[in-house]
Image (cartoon, rainbow, N blue to C red):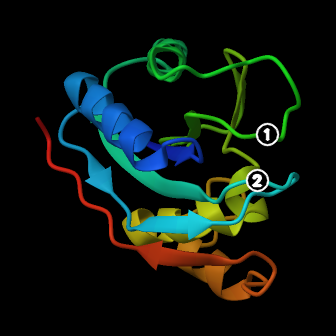
């Protein structure tokens, strides 16, 4: 059984799409471990704020199988894959970690670089896995967050609730 953490983000009808994504994730992987939800300014473009969170779960699925499931969930939520890399989106789901795997596996780079680059990934990951060690840096996510330039990206906790169907 592998412990997996994924990031979820949406800035188009964001609560609707995040709830749909959580329902879909719960149908494949249960129980889910949810971070707090964060309101975040977009990075790399001007647009509406994102709703971001991190979800953890245990699975016997391979990285390739998880990637296919996440892509299907994004597609089912109207994800458009054409256009600029940094743009508004209904749903973005990325694998952050798969146990302590390091490297490029089935088109996925692990651990995902955004963990140390973006507050909207690192802080929610700290919520759910703060004492776990980053597989390359061998520092806890809490330690990484404490050393992070927290003023560099604006984000705030928002009231968001989800109950499995």
Q: Give the alpha-carbon distance from disc 1 to disc 2, as whole Å.
A: 8 Å
| Residue 157 vs residue 96, the one in the foreground | 157
Q: Looking at the image, which residue is at 80% across and 57% down?
A: 43
Residue at mark 1: 87
As drawn, the label of residue 47 is: 2
| Residue 76 vs residue 145, the one in the foreground | 76
Helix, strand or loop at label 1? It is loop
Q: From this view, report whether residue 63 is shown above or below residue 85.
A: above
**Cβ–Cβ under 8 Å for marks 1 and 2:** yes
Q: Looking at the image, which residue is at 70% across and 77% down?
A: 154
The spot of residue 131 in percent (x, y) is 44, 73
Residue 137 in sight here: yes
State which quarter of the image contains the C terminus: top left
Q: From this view, report whether residue 34 is shown above or below residue 158.
A: above
- Between discs 1 and 2, the one toward the N terminus: 2
State which quarter of the image contains the N terminus: top left
């Amino acid at each position: 059984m592998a412990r997996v953490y994924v990031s979820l983000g949406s800035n188009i009808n964001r609560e609707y799409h995040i709830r749909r994504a959580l329902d879909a994730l719960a149908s494949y992987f249960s129980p889910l471990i949810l971070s707090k939800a964060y309101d975040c300014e977009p990075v790399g473009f001007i647009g509406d704020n994102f709703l971001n969170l991190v979800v953890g779960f245990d699975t016997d699925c391979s990285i390739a199988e998880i990637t296919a499931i996440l892509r299907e969930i994004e597609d089912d939520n109207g994800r458009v894959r054409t256009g600029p890399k940094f743009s508004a989106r209904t749903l973005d789901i990325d694998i952050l970690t798969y146990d302590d795997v390091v490297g490029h596996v089935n088109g996925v780079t692990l651990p995902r670089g955004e963990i140390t680059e973006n507050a909207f990934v690192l802080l929610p990951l700290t919520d759910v896995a703060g004492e776990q060690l980053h597989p390359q840096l061998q520092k806890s996510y809490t330690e990484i967050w404490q050393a992070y330039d927290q003023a560099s990206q604006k984000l705030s906790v928002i009231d968001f609730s989800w109950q499995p169907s």
